[in-house]
Image (cartoon, rainbow, N blue to C red):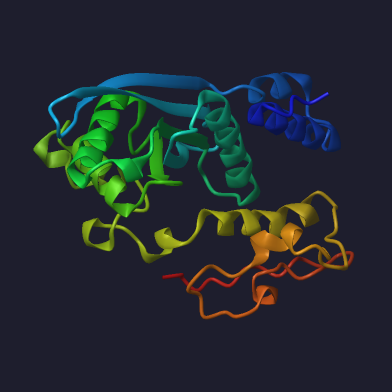
Amino acid sequence: MTDTTSLFATALAQFKRGADLIDLPDDLRSILSQPKNEVIVNFPVRMNDGSYRVFRGYRIQHSNLLGPYKGGVRFHPLVNLDEVKALASWMTWKSALCEIPFGGAKGGISFDPNTLEADELERVVRRFTHALGENIGPDHDIPAPDLGSNAQSMVWMMDTYANSTGATERQNVKRIVTGKTLETGGAPAGRRPPGRAWCSASSTGPTRWGLIWPARRPASRASATWAQPPVGSSRSTASEWWPSPTTEGQSPTRMASTPLN
């Protein structure tokens, strides 16, 4: 029975069901059932009152079989090893289903960013980046914004990482993160909500494995929450965000490609 208290146990159960469907060899099951690397860092940060506080950060690298590790960095008091391991594995499957050349990773710091002053938050992000050191890099592991973090956080990470390289490499290492501001080399598409990629993967995967979308949408509003248009979107109905039902031999309708503000 799946441990309902463990998010990673849930992710493993999902992986097992998928592996059974495609008759995945046992050796590959063993390799993909655990992350390749689990990085945990504890780093001190000087607060504005002169005291020092030790923060705990994580970077879980699940798989880089398809390309560099890729995944968000979240700031939240409940961030823990079990959660980040599950999220890193899901990043692997999302990249694979979307056929993009990235592996899966996830990171985070266990704290509430809303309780810190802006300069304190900057020091936390920079110290975390420094503590990760060579565990991240534009050709190895590429962080991105996630819960609690934003484009400014990515700019701080990028700048901290760039300061550890030579002057001739500063422009080249801007690709250490995605989701940074447009002024620092970010792309408009990077501002789309993370859940949208999940929708794209979901609209592609079922047909590939011979599965068909149900002919009817869920009757429960709660079960259709993910299909609601993002806050501030000009689209007024969820139907424009929901993958169209398919019949045998047809491909699902892809999500609209218009960048979100």
Location of residue 8 in the rendering, given as x and y in whole percent from the top left corner? 64, 28
Q: Is residue 46 visible?
A: yes
Number of dots carrying numbers: 0
Location of residue 255 in the rendering, given as x and y in whole percent from the top left corner? 62, 68
Location of residue 105 in the rendering, given as x and y in whole percent from the top left corner? 49, 34
Where 244 falls versus 169 (above or below)? below
Location of residue 131 in the rendering, given as x and y in whole percent from the top left corner? 28, 24
Identity of the residue drawn at 20% across and 22% down:
52
Whether residue 89 sits left or right of residue 16 in the image: it is left
Identity of the residue drawn at 24% across and 29% down:
127
Whether residue 127 sits left or right of residue 5 in the image: it is left
Residue lying furthest left in this view?
167
Identity of the residue drawn at 18% across and 42% down:
119
Q: Quadrant of residue 39?
A: top left
Quadrant assignment for the C terminus: bottom left
Q: Quadrant of residue 157?
A: top left
Quadrant assignment for the N terminus: top right
Where 107 falls versus 114 (above or below)? above
Q: Nearer the viewer, residue 86 or 25?
A: 86
Identity of the residue drawn at 10% across and 39% down:
167
Q: Quadrant of residue 22?
A: top right
Q: Is residue 65 visible?
A: no
Residue lying furthest front in this view?
49
Whether residue 27 sits left or right of residue 101 in the image: it is right
